[in-house]
Amino acid sequence: MKKIVIFGASGDTGKYLVDYFLKQEGYSSEFEIIASGTKDTDFFQKINVPYIKVDITQKENFNKLPSEVYAVIDLAGTMPARMKGYNPQKYIDVNITGTLNILDYCRKTNADRILFTQSFGDIKDYGDEYLVLNPNMPRKFSFTSDHTVYVLTKNFAVDLIENYHQMYGLKRFIFRLPTIYLYSPIDKYYVDGNERKIGYRILIDKAIAGETIEVWGDKTRKKDMVYVKDFCQMLYKATFVNKTKGYYNVGTGIGTTLEDQIKGIVEIFGKTGQKSQIIERPDLTNAPQYIMDITAAINDLDYKPKYNYLEMLRDFKKEMQLNRF
C-alpha cells in the first residue's frame, strides 16, 4: 500500500485534493492518504482520513509521520494573500526552512517523489508582453513589492528540490500556479498586508443580489481560469506518472475575456428577472492578462482539463450550496 503524505492538507486546495484522491479507483486498495496541516479541524475525521498536525518549520514534528512513504505532495507555504501586515521572516521560515525539512523527510523515508507548488509570480510580469506564459521562461519579477520575498523563497525552494533530485535521486514535479478558482467560506485575502474581499467573490455577490457590475479597463483582456478540480487532476496524475521529473504550468490553456468572465457570473449566479446590469468602464484600471502554456502537462501527464469557464462556475455554485469544506 503506497502512503502519500499531503502537507498543507488543511488549506482550501488541500481539502479539495484529499477529496479528489478519495474518489479515485485505487484509493484504499493501492494507496492511502495521510493529511497534514497546522489547523485544528475535524474535517478529515469525518471522511476517515488520518490527520496529523505538523509544523513544517520544526524538524522534530516530522517524527509524528510515517517512516516510509511513496510520495509527498507539498501544498504548505506562507503567501501574501494570507499575511496580515508584512513579516518576510515568515516566508523564510516556512517556504525555505519548511521545504528543507520536508525534503529531509523525503530522503529519510525513501520517498519516490515530491510534488511542489510554486507561484507564477516569477513569470507573470511577462503577461502584457506575451499573453501565453511558457514554463521555461526566465524568471522576471519586481524586487520592489510585498510579494518579492515570497517569490524569492518559492524560487529558492524549487532550487532546493532540484538539489535533492540530482543529489539523492528524488523525483520532482513542480507546478506553477496562477489563481486557482474554488469555493471557500473564506472570501477575503490580504493586499499589502491589508484585508480585502476577493475580486471575483465581489462580482458573484453582486450577481446574486442583482446589483450593477462594472467592467473595468479593456474588456477583451484574457485570463486563464483554472478550476481547483482540474488542478487536482494534474497533481493526481503526477503522483503516479512513470517519469523522473516535470515542470508544469497549471491552467486550461484557454483565455476567457474579462467581458465573458462577468457575463458568465451574471448568467450562473443571477436570479431570473433580476440579472445585473453590466456597465463598461474603459477609463479604469486594466485587469491582469495571461494564458498558461500547459503543453508539458498534456504530453507528460495526459492532462485534460474537464471544466470550461461556465462549467467551473456551475460547479462552484454547487459547492457553495453544499459547503462541504
Image: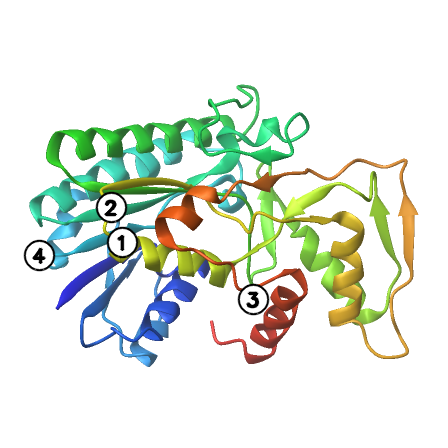
Using the numbered discs, state the Cα–Cα distance from disc 1 to disc 4 in whole angstroms.
Answer: 20 Å
Mark 4 and mark 3: Cα distance apart in space: 35 Å
Q: Label 3, on which residue?
A: 185
The crowd level at tag 3 (other Cα within 10 Å; few <14, some 14-19, many 20+) is few
Place residue 164 in its image quadrant.
top left
The answer to whether residue 93 is above or below residue 19 is: above
* Label 2 crowd bin: few (<14), some (14–19), many (20+), radius 10 Å: some
Which residue is pictured at 51% across the width and 33% down the height?
134
Regarding mark 2 in the picture, which secondary structure is present there?
loop
| Residue holding disc 1 | 241
Element at badge 4?
loop
Lower position in the chain sequence, tag 1 or tag 4: 4
Which amino acid, by three-letter code, is at mark 2? Lys
User: Which is in the foreground here, disc 4 or disc 2?
Assistant: 2
- On-image quarter of the N terminus: bottom left
Q: Earlier in the sequence, mark 4 or mark 2?
A: 4
Q: CA distance from mark 2 to mark 1?
A: 6 Å
Residue lying at 48% horizontally and 47% vertically, measured from the top left? 250
7 in relation to 246, above or below: below
**85 relative position to 171: left or right:** right
The residue that disc 4 covers is 68
Nearest the viewer among 246 and 314 is 246
Q: CA distance from mark 3 to mark 2?
A: 37 Å
**In the rendered view, does 194 fall on the left or right side of 139?**
right
Q: Can the viewer see residue 244?
A: yes
**Residue 82, percent from left and from top:** 50, 46
**Contact check, label 2 and label 1, Cβ < 8 Å:** yes
